[in-house]
Image (cartoon, rainbow, N blue to C red):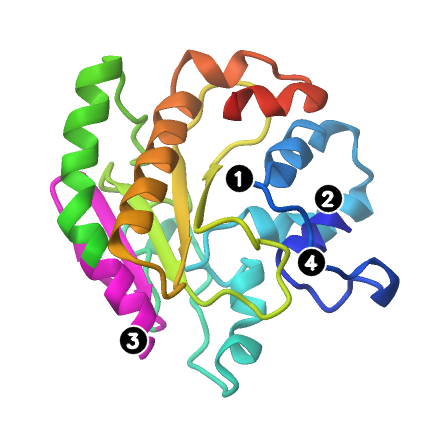
Amino acid sequence: YKVFALFADPRLPAAYRGIGEATVDNMILTIAGRRWPTLSATAQAQLAPFFVPPGYAESWFAARSQSVTGAPRAPLRAASRASDCEVINALFTTRTTAHFDIHYWQGDADAARVADILVTEVEKVWNVETAAFGRFPLSDANERQGSCDGAVDIWVFPLNPGSSHIGDVAWTKTYHEGCSPSPSYMVMWDLPVDAIKIRNALAHEFFHVLEFGSYSNVVGCSPDDAWISEA
């Protein structure tokens, strides 16, 4: 139910709907991922779409794309080995930098504005943090739902009304569940916030990309210790 609340999924019973927790980062997907082996097959089937990057037909976002826009859109392409390196469907425009692929929702002025800011800031954040930590993201080149070019993917799209993401501008998700190091991608909402807040959110989330790709993803791996990622 907490995952449903995070995405304003209509399956969430009315009794559990509310404003959520005012957290810097909502850790529920990380916690759910660490509990994945203990979940029932039914629960795993219900939650699986939330763990798929937005640009794929298997994702929760694909299933909800009509409700996000209020009108039907072209169908998203299912990910397959034949189309691995194409990645993007007709719903997103992609902008690239030296180390990032930024995919933003077409026809969304706020998403385009966020993408413009990201293009300006991402390489600055990369240079500062990789130099400070001596760590680099794991490549997604071999990921079925990565962009196959090794770049870090950032997805920018509309936040559903009613989401419990009240305190978040962005979040980071690994491609693999569990406690082993994994490449990851970022999601950023198309919120009308200023450039400084977007830059700060980017810097925070890129730290998680470095963390999840290195030693820190195996520290505090109990679901009850997920908070350590934000300590």
Instruction: Give the label, 4 or 2, closer to the camera.
Output: 4
Q: Which image quadrant for residue 220?
A: top right
The numbered mark, 3 or 1, whose residue comes first in the sequence reads 1
For mark 1, does the 10 Å Cα neighbourhood hold few (<14), some (14 to 19), or many (20 or more) residues? many
Q: Is mark 1 on a helix, strand or loop?
A: loop
Count how many numbered circles sit on residues in the image: 4
- The earlier-in-sequence mark between 1 and 2 is 1
Question: Does the magenta segment cover residue 32?
Answer: no
Name of the residue lying farthest toward the right = 15
The first of marks 2 and 3 along the sequence is 2
- SS assignment at label 3: helix
Q: Label 4: few (<14), some or many (≥20) within 10 Å?
A: few
Toward the bottom, the furthest residue is: 71
Q: Is residue 190 left or right of residue 86?
A: right
Mark 1, residue position: 25
Q: Which amino acid does label 4 sit on?
A: Ile
Residue 184 place in picture, x, y as percent:
41, 35
Query: How far is disc 1 from disc 4 in space, using C-alphas?
Result: 15 Å
Q: Distance between the residues labelled 1 and 2?
A: 23 Å
